[in-house]
C-alpha cells in the first residue's frame, strides 16, 4: 500500500443507498412477512405502491421521523406500516401488532438489508491500513470514519448486524471517548440532531463529534448517493463532497473528480492523495 503524506482525514458516509440497500424490494418484504402472519389478498406490487404512498405522506406530515412533534421513531414507522396495509386490505381487516413488530425488527437488521459489494473490501483495506505504524503511514496520516444519515436510530444496528463494527458514540449521547478501533467511530443521525441534510447544521454536528480527533488541521470529506443532500450539502457546509454515483446518472451534473461509481475508487483516490 502506498499512501502519500497528508492531513488527518475525517471521512463520513451516508448510510442507506450508500453503504447498504434493501435485500429485496420493500413491497416484496412486506408481502412475505404479512403472509407469514396470515394476511392475503394483495400482490407484492400492491404493497410496494402502497408503501411508497404511505411513506411519502408520513414524511410530509411529520418530517424527520416525527422528531419535531416528539413522536418516537418506532411509532412513526408503525404508522407507515399500518397505512401501507390499510391501503390494500379490506376495511374489516386489522393489521396484527405481531406483524408490525416483525417488520420493525426486519428493517433494523440484516434481515432487511445487504451491504453493497464494495463495502466490506473498503473496510478491510482500512483495517489493514490502521495496522501500519503511524510513523510509516503516508496520506492520510490518520483517518476517522463517521456516519451522517437522515435516519432514526436503526442505522447502527443495521450496520453492526451486517458485520461493520460501530462505536457507541452518537450525537447527543454521553459517550465521549472509547478505546480500540471500530470501523465507524461515531454516528450523527438527523433524528438526534433534529435537522436533516443538506442543512449545514448536521455537518456542523459531525464536526463537533470529531473535535478531539487529531491536533493538526483536518480534511473533511463526506460521501453519499444524493446529489442534493450529500454532495451539495457537504460542499455548502465547507466540506469536500463526493457523490457515490453507482448507476452513472450524474455524469453531466458533477465534476468527474467529485464523482465515483464505487468505494474502490474512493480508496484509490485516498491512497494517491487526490483529495488533499
Image (cartoon, grey):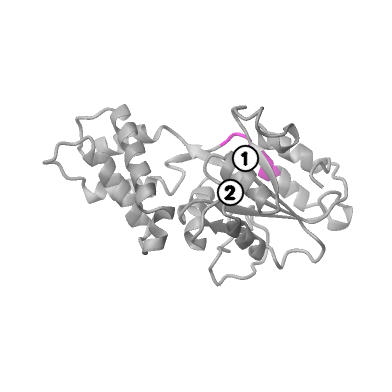
Which of 80 and 137 lies nearest the eye of the viewer?
A: 80
Q: Residue placed at 60% from the left, 45% from the top?
A: 230
How far from the left and from the top, in percent, is residue 81?
A: 30, 45
Q: What is the quadrant of residue 208 in the picture?
A: bottom right
How far from the left and from the top, in percent, is residue 220?
A: 72, 53
How far from the left and from the top, in percent, is residue 20?
A: 53, 40
Q: Residue placed at 70% from the left, 66% from the top?
A: 211
* Cα–Cα span, label 1 and label 2: 9 Å
Question: SS for tag 2?
Answer: loop
Q: Residue placed at 66% from the left, 61% from the top?
A: 207
Residue lying at the far left in this picture: please name it.
92
Q: Is residue 53 left or right of residue 206?
A: left
How far from the left and from the top, in percent, is residue 142?
A: 78, 56
Determine if the magenta segment contains residue 120.
yes
Q: Which residue is mark 1?
A: 119
Q: Residue placed at 34% from the left, 44% from the top?
A: 57
Q: Which badge, 1 or 2, is on the more N-terminal residue? A: 1
Q: What is the quadrant of residue 118 in the picture?
A: top right
Q: Which residue is mark 2?
A: 164
Determine if the magenta segment contains residue 191.
no
Q: Is residue 195 left or right of residue 135?
A: left
Which of 11 and 118 lies nearest the eye of the viewer?
A: 11
Question: SS for tag 1?
Answer: helix
Which of 209 and 156 lies nearest the eye of the viewer?
A: 209
Mark 1 Cα-neighbour bin, 10 Å: few <14, some 14–19, many ≥20: some
User: Given contact means CB atoms under 8 Å apart, are the residues at marks 1 and 2 in contact?
Assistant: yes
Mark 2 Cα-neighbour bin, 10 Å: few <14, some 14–19, many ≥20: some
Q: Is residue 1 left or right of residue 70?
A: right
Query: Is the residue 43 above or below the residue 89 in the image?
Result: above
Give the magenta part as a residue range: 116-124
Q: What is the chief secondary structure element of the magenta stretch?
A: helix
Query: Is the residue 95 above or below the residue 143 in the image?
Result: above
Amino acid at each position: 500500500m502506498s499512501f502519500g503524506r497528508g492531513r488527518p482525514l475525517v471521512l463520513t458516509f451516508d448510510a442507506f443507498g450508500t453503504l447498504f440497500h434493501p435485500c429485496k424490494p420493500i413491497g416484496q418484504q412486506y408481502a412475505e412477512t404479512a403472509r407469514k402472519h396470515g394476511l392475503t389478498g394483495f400482490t407484492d406490487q400492491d404493497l410496494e405502491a402502497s408503501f411508497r404512498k404511505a411513506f411519502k405522506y408520513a414524511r410530509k406530515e411529520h418530517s424527520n421521523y416525527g422528531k419535531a412533534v416528539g413522536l418516537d421513531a418506532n411509532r412513526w414507522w408503525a404508522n407507515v406500516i399500518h397505512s401501507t396495509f390499510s391501503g390494500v386490505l379490506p376495511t374489516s381487516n386489522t393489521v396484527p401488532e405481531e406483524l408490525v413488530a416483525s417488520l420493525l425488527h426486519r428493517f433494523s437488521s440484516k434481515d432487511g438489508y445487504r451491504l453493497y459489494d464494495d463495502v466490506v473490501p473498503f473496510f478491510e483495506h482500512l483495517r489493514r491500513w490502521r495496522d501500519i505504524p503511524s510513523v510509516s503511514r503516508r496520506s492520510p496520516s490518520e483517518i476517522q470514519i463517521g456516519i451522517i444519515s437522515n435516519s432514526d436510530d436503526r442505522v447502527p444496528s443495521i450496520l453492526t448486524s451486517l458485520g461493520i463494527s460501530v462505536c457507541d458514540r452518537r450525537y447527543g449521547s454521553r459517550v465521549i471517548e472509547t478505546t480500540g478501533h471500530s470501523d465507524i467511530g461515531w454516528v450523527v443521525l438527523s433524528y438526534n440532531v433534529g435537522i436533516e441534510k443538506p442543512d449545514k447544521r448536521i455537518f456542523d454536528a459531525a464536526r463537533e463529534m470529531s473535535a478531539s480527533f487529531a491536533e493538526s488541521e483536518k480534511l473533511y470529506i463526506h460521501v453519499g448517493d444524493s446529489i442534493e443532500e450529500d454532495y451539495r450539502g457537504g460542499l455548502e457546509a465547507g466540506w469536500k463532497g463526493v457523490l457515490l454515483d453507482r448507476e452513472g446518472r450524474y455524469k453531466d451534473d458533477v465534476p468527474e473528480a467529485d464523482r465515483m461509481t464505487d468505494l474502490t475508487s474512493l480508496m484509490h483516490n485516498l491512497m494517491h492523495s487526490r483529495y488533499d
